[in-house]
Image (cartoon, grey):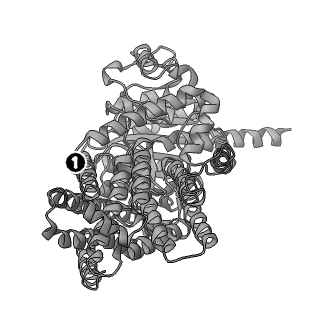
Amino acid sequence: MKKTLILIFLILTVINSCGYSQGYEKTIFIVVDQMPMEAGEKIMGENYAGGLINTKTVTPYNPVSFSLSVATGRKVGIDESNFKGLHKNRDGSIKVMGYDRIVKSLNDKYSNFVSEVDFFGEKLKNQGIGYIGNGPSSLIACDKKGNIESGETYINYDLDWLVDKTNNILKKENILIMDYDIYEENDGIEILKSYLNEYKDLNVILVSRNVADNMKGMLNKWLSLIIYKSEGGENGILTSLSTKREGIVTLLDIFPHVLSIYGLESKTAIGKSFNISPVEKQPMAAVKKVFDNTMGQLWSTYFFHGIIYYTFCYFAYFIVKRRYDKYKNAALYFDFIAVIIFVSFLLGFFNMQGYPIVYILLVLMISYPISYFFRQRKMNTAFFFSTVTYLFMVLGIIFFPEVIYNSFVGFNNIVFGFRYYGFNNGAMGVLLACSIISYFSVKNMIKDKLYKNILLILYFSLNIIALSSRVGANTGGFLASIILFLIMIYEEIFERNLTWKSILGLFIVGFLIMFINVYLDLHSFDRSHAGDLLYRIEFLGSKELWDMVKLKLKELIWFTITPPWCIVAVSQVLSVRSLFKDNIQINRIKDIRPDVYKEYLIFMVIGAISLLINDTGIISSIFMVGYFLISLMDADIRSYDL
């Protein structure tokens, strides 16, 4: 009996000698004011993973919006004046002052938001949450009444103090949220590094609320740093199913990830939990490379979009004024656009985004001689480059999507957080435009009606596959591709002869395609954003759909009426209109492209649909109408040789 008591005493002594209770997953989540790459490199110990995190919320952008977006796993935004500070109660709990106003603001902006949406502090309340600090990050820790179980309403940048308070909190709670200002003290980075070394066996999430000064620039307002360590510890860079991009996660992924640590999940959070991809080099070096590549590619994308937009606007003047002496130059530079798009896809294999000047010069130096050669030889440039671009895009998005993303057309603007994977709306426009031009060109080489119909089904079903939720994941493009498929059947197979049976047949085909896509998406492990939206609608009701529609409608209006897109779109429409009003010219074009009127109808209809059903649909329309202009000018110049 005496030996048993001694053994029990020794066990209790060992347990109590630990600074915090054992046997449960412990998580420390630290929000810092800003964290440069150099600071992140110093702070990261062994078995840490790093990444870039997109911190963009809904307007207004401020620390309160940031914290509430983390807390709910959804982008929200309210006025930061609603947060009135913290009050520590006698029992050690903390009350968030002004929380009633925060709740009212959220509910006013998003109907029944607080009652229906999961919150970090409420969902994980049973795990126990403590807090250290005096800022808006307390909104992550508090429950739906604005209460935090325990903690401190100030922070002392002293290692012993931080360790003592952390141990006290983690004896009772499993999760600690902390506000930490790296530059509050001269040795703030060293203190934080030493602090994290004390808890190297715990889960640690360290996220920078603001973009560091040396990472911020004209093109980067939202990409910041995140550091993560799981209890097991694993070296690498972060990714998630939200982004499907190595080294990139979103603000909305934090809440679902912490839930996953404790075996929980949320039906209302939009993000997904983290994964760690192992890297051979130091994690922060890999993160820096991702950042440099992203910023370099952003510069390249703006440059080439600028060239394309300027070219269409510049030659619109000469086309509208019927300056035939300029048409040969217009055809050459329009060909140049088609070539640089294809060349940029090819160079995606070489991962050159981190060197924007070299990349830009290489694309230009390769593309111009090719364009000049094709034009001098009076070759069918529109057909050739539409076909090879189309085949490359379809095969690329299925087998090597990173190569597509490495091109300026396929680049997803992860800085602004519009899209992280799949075909963006510009790439979608290029894909559909190339399929139309290529199909009508190949079709005219085939005499057998059956083979023409097989060709049609092959081309336009490939569009649907490439844009489906399991491949290109572009919902608006997927709908546009279905409509295009049905229009092509109506025009080419039914030859505009519709009966009630054929109308019903087209409707059933369209419905079945959509149903199969939705079914596969909803029953897959990694649902697309559209699949997740349907999943949330099932739980939250139709208001989730209407909130999304209102948001997308605002973005659609903004992009459509904002220069340079509106200017380019108008100039393209005027160019097409002018070409079709010139009967002599359009008849010459018709000799080269017999289905030009049919193509005109299809391009205008699908271009308009793409514009209306995508938030950045104006970009897809610009590329679609742009390719149509390329084919028209190419045919016009070649018609002189007949």
Left or right: 104, with 257 as reference point: left
Q: Is residue 535 above or below residue 242?
A: above
Q: Is residue 391 visible?
A: yes
Image spot of residue 329 (x, y percent)? 18, 72
Q: Residue at the location (44% across, 57% down)? A: 428
Identify the element where label 1 is drawn. Answer: helix
Residue lying at the far right of the rendered structure: 1
Which quarter of the picture shows residue 96? top left
Q: Residue at the location (33% across, 70% down)? A: 338
Residue closest to the eye, 267 or 229: 267
Image spot of residue 550 (x, y percent)? 43, 30
Residue closest to the eye, 601 or 61: 601
Q: Is residue 242 above or below residue 352?
A: above
Residue closest to the eye, 324 or 135: 324
Q: Is residue 468 above or below residue 558?
A: below
Split into 4 quadrants, where in the image is the C terminus?
Answer: bottom left
Q: Residue at the location (56% across, 38% down)? A: 533
- Category of crowding for the residue at label 1, using alpha-carbon neighbours closer than 10 angstroms: few (below 14), some (14–19), many (at least 20): some
Check disc 1 and give the amino acid type. Ile
Which quarter of the picture shows residue 633? bottom left
Split into 4 quadrants, where in the image is the N terminus?
Answer: top right
Q: Residue at the location (38% across, 29% down)? A: 77
Dot 1 corresponds to which residue? 567
Image spot of residue 292 (x, y percent)? 31, 63
| Callout count | 1
Q: Is residue 266 visible?
A: no
Image spot of residue 345 (x, y percent)? 39, 71
